[in-house]
Amino acid sequence: MLAYILRRILYVVPIAFGVSVVCFSLVHLAPGDPLQTILPADATAETIEIVKKAYGFDKPIPVQFGLWLLHVLQGDFGVSISSRRPVIDEVLGSLSNTLVLTGFAIPVAFVIGFTMGAIAGCHPGRAIDRFVTGVAVMGVSLPNYWLGIVLVIVFAVEWMVLPATGMGPSGSASFSIFRLDDLRYLILPVITLSMIPIGILSRTTRAAVAEIRGQDFIITLRAKGLSEFAIIRHVVKNAMPGVLAVMGLQFGYLIGGSILIETVFTWPGSGFLLSKSIINRDIPVLQGSILLLAMVFVATNLLVDLLQSAIDPRIRRA
Amino acid sequence: MDVRHWGMAGMIAAAAAVGAVAVGPSPAAAQGTLRVAMTAGDLPITTGTADQGFEGMRFVAYNLYDALVNWDLSRSDVAADVRPGLATSWEIDPANPKRWIFKLRQGVKWHDGCPFTADDVVWNFQRYTDNKTPQFDTFQFALTRAYLTNFEGIEKIDDQTIAITTKQVSSLFHYNLSLVVMISRCRAEALKFDWKEYVTQPSGTGPFRYVSSVPRERMEMAPNKEYWDDKRRAKFDKLVLIPMPEAATRTAALLSGQVNFIEAPSPDTIPRLKSSGMTIVTNSYPHNWSYQLNFVSGPFTDVRVRRAANYAINRPDMKELLGGLMEEGYSTVPRSTAYYGNPIEYKFDPKKANALLKEAGCLPCNITLAISTSGSGQMQPLPMNELAKSNLEAAGFKVNFEVMDWNALLDVGRGGVGRFPNINGINISRAAQDPWYGLIRHVTKTQWAPAGANWGHYSTPAMEDLVTRIGEEFDGGKRLVLLKQLNEQMNDQAVLLWVAHDVNPRALSPKVKGFVQAQSWFQDLTPITITP
């Protein structure tokens, strides 16, 4: 098991390097000036040159990359061009805010999606199955930013029972999940964010449960006289590794932050930070956040793999 | 309990949890708190002159700080002009027209309690311009460089007086100083010039003091009860600034009571806001949505083609498209500007446009325009450009758009026709807050891109002569006459393709009273009162 974990951790090194190279190349290939945030629209060529030199953007791109990588290896991700705050603080702060959102959205999605999928899988072809499939397709197909706006209109604007935007009445610095008033700010973004995972998880679960219920060992269990509840426990246990893998992927996607949802709800998470740094061409933040988010994604997948192999030892042997 | 029951129970439990938490309306904002939803995606920088465009100046820099020259934002019925700030008066040295002498305001204190002195002013200008001084700040250098291109040096004459020398004679130099704010030397020295620390401990002389901020989320300020201008002491308890780049989100936040003042609601939400009792305020202001044209190559080198393009635009239709939220643009500055004069206005006349194109031998007249999908001050760029295209094509043009994001278009704008010779025009909205920004920079050779904002390299001997005479004319009345002539000449030569002036819509909760929308990019929040 230890060798397996070490091997998986080693895989992270080339992935991190590849992500860094691709990310660095992409942000530099995009048209525009990385210093546009601080340069006025009518900045002169002389001003641009002076500021570029001060920020190190006058050096050849491979040299810039090498210097950046050297600093990253020492734990220094640089400083945001636009806010002057350390990139690591920017990214970790926003990541923790996204984690709060995801930490609620994933369990909600898992419980609802798995339950719905299991019910549908147990009754293939019946009305409940068609209903669940319909809901799942809707969850996957509805543009979630549209859903977010509709929820805001209904619950915040028309009924005025929930806040429309933000992370707590005084911002994320004082946000607490143990305070009822703060929790109200989570409801609409969590519902919006969990819709797609609910759809995906329920469809995956339905397919897995329906398939497992048709296998020979289920007939054997029935022949042994096991109750329906006991049979379902077996089905669920067998369906779980596949569902967990999908859930892990969804968790990774959500940790990356949903740019649209976080923008609609002004939730100061990693998606919001990414969109802002793309618009501002804040290259240090963009590079730092993509690299860190990629690492989180890789770590999440590793955790899911370990969890899967704990549940099903055949995976580890393979 | 079978699976169905478990599922149902789970869903009921989840719904109950949501219902338990979602009780009652949003908590009411604290009494006397002005909560502003800005269009910016982040909090503007607090270390002096602000970033995030003029919105940063409007809400952060001009609330925390003063400049030597401030803007008079007290009236809505006239275009805003400058007035004394930390300098009580200024005059030109009779022996040297490049030397400006400023008398400084006495008895002013920084928010940290230190007295404001002439040494502080000298120190501040060094901070913006002199990279050999310990207080030099590259970030602020970048932000203020455009305003200090003509700055040569500064000297302290005595404790109450300083002198600034310019590189060229310029009677309009004091307008540039309105964008260069003064920060506390005392605080900066205490923080050992660590500007990252200064961000969260700024100290100025402005009408509001910094209280706290959460990066990307909110900044709180409290009124400066000892503000030197007692007429501008704020009448509410707290100012909260919230970056909210999405227009629909700002609208929802206002309607749900989370904020009580929003910037730039989108035109289609105005009826809904009005029906909910919100106050919509608009006013003319020096904003210019137009196309800068290529004067080096292509059809726009011919004045007949430029005039044809101006005749082709149906500005009343454009206004209808925006739900009335624009002023028809017939010149670089709005009609209410003091130096508007009596220029020729190219009213919608497609037949005349077509005849001019025929006369110029350019029919169909192929043009390529660079436009953006969004951007600061770009209003609704895509539908507006589509309408402009359909107007131009109806008159005989054939329009090819090069659509790019805002950052890429800024790059085209800075590069100028030298780098982008195949583009015939660019759609970058420009501020026109003073005569230099409004008019001169579009027509003088010293501003040819990439050195300045004259993207298409326009210049004629007659126009250059007029610009020189304006710069050398220190008598306000006489200068006004020359400026009117300049605007009239610019229209005669159709140096831009004018379309619209924004009217800066804002939506306010009915509880917010007393706001006076100045004809300016900047606004004064201090007269506002908030009813419980």
Image (cartoon, rainbow, N blue to C red):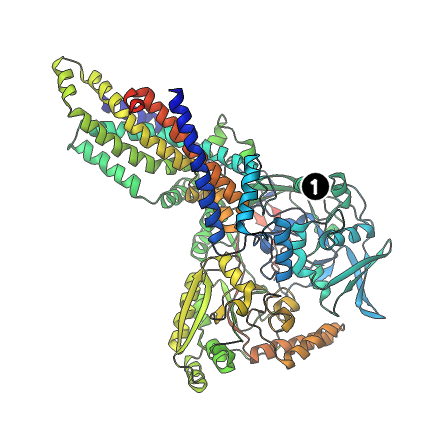
Name which residue type carries label 1.
Asp
Q: Whole-percent x and y of residue B409?
A: 50, 61
Can residue B320 be seen by looking at this rendering?
yes
Q: Nearer the viewer, residue A209 or B387?
A: A209
**In the rendering, at what x and y percent does residue A48 appear?**
61, 57
In the depicted structure, whether residue B500 falls above or below residue B45: below
Q: Residue furthest bottom?
A: B359
Q: Which residue is mark 1?
A: B194
**Residue B464, quarter of picture:** bottom right
- The extreme left residue here reads A223
List x then y, in percent, for residue B227: 74, 47
Is residue B450 found left or right of B252 in the rendered image?
A: right
Q: Residue at x 13, y 17 (%)?
A: A220
Q: Secondary structure at mark 1?
A: loop
**Numbered circles on residues, count:** 1
User: Seen in the image, is B111 located left or right of residue A70?
Assistant: right
Image quarter hosting the N terminus of chain B: top left
Q: Is residue B45 above or below residue B408?
A: above
Question: How many neighbours does mark 1 have within 10 angstroms: few (below 14), some (14-19), or many (20 or more)?
Answer: few
Chain letter belonging to callout 1: B
> Viewer-proximal residue, A189 or B309?
B309
**Is residue B74 shown to the viewer in this render?**
no
* Residue A197: x %, y % from top left: 33, 35
Q: Residue at x 52, y 73 (%)?
A: B294
Kindly indicate the quadrant of the structure image that contains residue B167. Answer: bottom right
